[in-house]
Image (cartoon, helix red, strand yellow):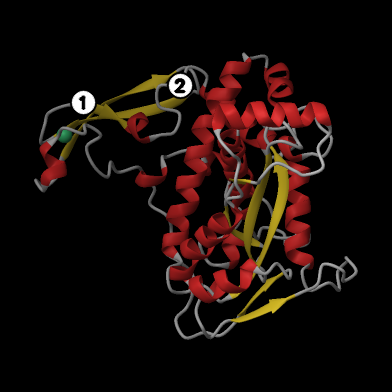
Amino acid sequence: MFTPPCCPNPLCSSHQGQPFTYQCRGSFHRALDDRLVQRYSCGVCGKFFSDQSFRLDYRLRKPKLTEPVFWMLASKVTHRQTARLLRCNRGTVHHRLELLGSHCREFHARQLQRLKGTLSPDLALDELETYETDRRLQPLTVPVLLHELSWFVLDVQVAPLASRGGLREPDRIRRDQLVARSGLRRSGSTEAVGKCFANIAPLLAPGAGGMLRSDEKLTYVRLKQKGLPEGMTHVRISSEEPRGMNNPLFRINRTLAMMRDGVSRLVRRTWAASKRREQLEKHLWVWVVFRNYVRRMINRSRGQSAASFHGLFPGQLPTHDLLGLCPQYRADPPLNRAAS
Ligand SMILES: [Zn+2]
């Protein structure tokens, strides 16, 4: 049974401290998805609302499309192909990406809050390179921070990189036009990695040692000293080490490879590459939530997700649950510390 947590009317006095009360006011059948929806009235402002007011599919014309779009965004299907498969407009897919991107980002942020002060410091960091519109002129970096033991993706950022050097004459002309239009493109890599550390540092269990694994990029040394606890060891591994399961960076390398395999925009030599980095970021949050909460932790761990390893949920989260209520209205099960 769903209990309305608050009044959805932003102007209601219940948001200024007056205790919220409500009354049940019958129900109606929603033919769109064959659900019985309970109606209520607010005891404070008197406005009517329903279960639907708290859901992600509130006021959507085609709520049944949200779940398949979520799966396709995490399965390397491009926007246009998603629209063809679901027999809908490309604008609908675009709208769902907007909706799912912010939903997944907020959902993950709220789950991380529940882990505050409990996370074992067992981290790995690496950056994936991609681009927006033009591979040479507008490259991007995507720092990814991983909890190694559980394969749980903690944070993802997207930042610009400076245009590449050694350009041919036509590319140099286009670069100069780009600089005149939107200014010199500078690398935001250091800032983005710093943000990853700043977001995750409050989650780490106090006093625990642990380690951060990364490659030998020099800026990581200073950023680790600045952003992560002193007792944490920074292990730097040469990128010349042979790849494979014995490489200490295996799990983060594998995660980046899985990300490329799941997100259509990141596939190499594709014409479906991102045109704007804001859209890439939204798409990545959908994949991160799929990876952490919906997919198995590894193929052999039946019924267990990376999130259930940390005790956030008892098992893999069904997508109808994930895409049901908006994150701020969810009542999640208490954190099961025994699971981690
Ligand atoms: Zn109210």
Image point 74% across, 22% down: which residue?
81
Image point 53% across, 35% down: which residue?
100
Exactly how many numbered labels are in the figure?
2
Which residue carries the number 2 mark? 60
Kind of element beneath mark 1? strand
Task: Choose top left, top right, bottom left or bottom right for residue 306.
Answer: bottom right
Task: Choose top left, top right, bottom left or bottom right for residue 89.
Answer: top right
Q: Quadrant of ligand 1?
A: top left
Q: Quadrant of the N terminus?
A: top left
- Pointer 1 and pointer 2: residues touching (CB < 8 Å)? no
Amino acid type, label 2 = Leu
Front residue of 291/153: it is 153
Front residue of 140/309: it is 140
Image point 82% across, 30% down: which residue?
169
Query: Which mark, residue 80?
Result: none
Q: Position of residue 249 (x, y in %)?
A: 77, 69
Front residue of 92/278: it is 278
Q: Position of residue 113 (x, y in %)?
A: 42, 61
Amino acid type, label 1 = Phe
Q: Position of residue 250 (x, y in %)?
A: 79, 67
Pointer 2 residue Cβ closer than 8 Å to ligand 1: no
Report crowding for label 1: few under 14, some 14 to 19, many 20 or more residues within 10 A (C-alpha): some
Q: Position of residue 31 (x, y in %)?
A: 46, 17
Residue 340 appears anywhere in the view: no
Which residue carries the number 1 mark? 48
Front residue of 46/180: it is 180
